[in-house]
């Protein structure tokens, strides 16, 4: 039962959006399903870490994150902004031969994973989201097994989301022309820059 509640929480509160959603869609279309899914998994790991902090009541870490929330958020905003600039400046290196794409992606999967993880983990507000979700669903973990079951449910829920998003986006890859890929890059890069500016602005208020 606790596992199912964790799964439901991740499906409701963890809907892919924001900077990581943009990265996942862009990479799924440009690089293929594997690249997009690796991006999503980075976010899943970060969410799981915050879920562990919330579910197991690790107050020392949660207090530290809340105390330095603005500084951490500022770093996250700068990072997102930088990724947006890089995306706009990078050349379109998409290959027409599928094998070449796969070979290139195998060397960059760790990079895709780490970029999304770094963005997601620099969002300490996530732990507050989970705490609100736990309260809304009336979840009180009485022992280690229940807490672990909750965290596992949240992890699998986020994985399901990113699996769905990356698979769906990758299906549209062949429908994009060279011009279409350029437009997509400009849109995604612009969105990342916008998200970055928004995060920095909020952290300075």
Image: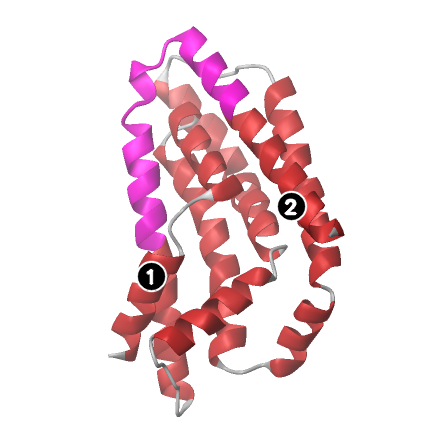
Does 66 appear in magenta?
no
Quadrant in which residue 27 is drawn: top left
Q: At x 53% / y 34%, what residue is drawn?
A: 107
Quadrant in which residue 156 is drawn: bottom left
- Pointer 1 residue: 156
Q: Is residue 160 above or below residue 193?
A: below
Packing grade of label 1 (10 A; few <14, some 14-19, many >=20) is some
Decide whether the magenta segment is chiefly helix, strand or loop.
helix
Quadrant in which residue 174 is drawn: top left
Q: Is residue 72 above or below residue 189?
A: below
- Pointer 2 residue: 199
Question: Which residue range is magenta in the image?
Answer: 159-187
Asked if one can make out residue 168 in the rendered structure from this viewpoint, the answer is yes
Marks 1 and 2, how far apart at CA: 27 Å
Q: At x 68% / y 53%, what residue is drawn?
A: 73
Packing grade of label 2 (10 A; few <14, some 14-19, many >=20) is many
Q: Secondary structure at mark 2?
A: helix
Relative image position of residue 33 (x, y in whole percent): 35, 34
Q: Is residue 178 above or below residue 139?
A: above
Residue 190 is left or right of residue 9, and the answer is right
Instruction: Say whether disc 1 or disc 2 marks the residue closer to the N-terminus.
Output: 1
Relative image position of residue 67 (x, y in whole percent): 72, 70
Q: Secondary structure at mark 1?
A: helix
Relative image position of residue 86 (x, y in whole percent): 65, 26
Give the camera-side residue of 59 and 156. Answer: 59
């Amino acid at each position: 039962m606790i596992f199912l509640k964790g799964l439901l929480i991740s499906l409701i509160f963890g809907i892919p959006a924001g900077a990581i959603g943009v990265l996942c869609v862009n990479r799924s279309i440009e690089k293929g399903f594997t690249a997009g899914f690796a991006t999503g998994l980075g976010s899943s790991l970060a969410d799981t870490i915050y879920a562990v902090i919330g579910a197991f009541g690790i107050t020392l870490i949660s207090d530290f994150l809340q105390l330095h929330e603005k500084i951490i958020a500022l770093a996250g905003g700068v990072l997102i902004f930088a990724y947006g600039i890089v995306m706009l400046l990078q050349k379109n290196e998409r290959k027409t031969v599928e094998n070449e794409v796969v070979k290139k992606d195998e060397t960059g999967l760790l990079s895709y994973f780490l970029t999304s993880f770094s963005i997601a983990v620099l969002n300490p507000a996530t732990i507050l989201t989970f705490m609100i979700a736990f309260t809304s669903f009336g979840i009180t973990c009485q022992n280690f097994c229940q807490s672990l079951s909750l965290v596992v449910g949240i992890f699998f829920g986020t994985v399901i989301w990113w699996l769905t998003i990356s698979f769906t986006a990758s299906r549209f890859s062949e429908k994009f022309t060279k011009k279409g890929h350029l437009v997509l890059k400009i849109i995604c890069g612009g969105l990342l820059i916008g998200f970055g500016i928004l995060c920095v602005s909020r952290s300075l208020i």
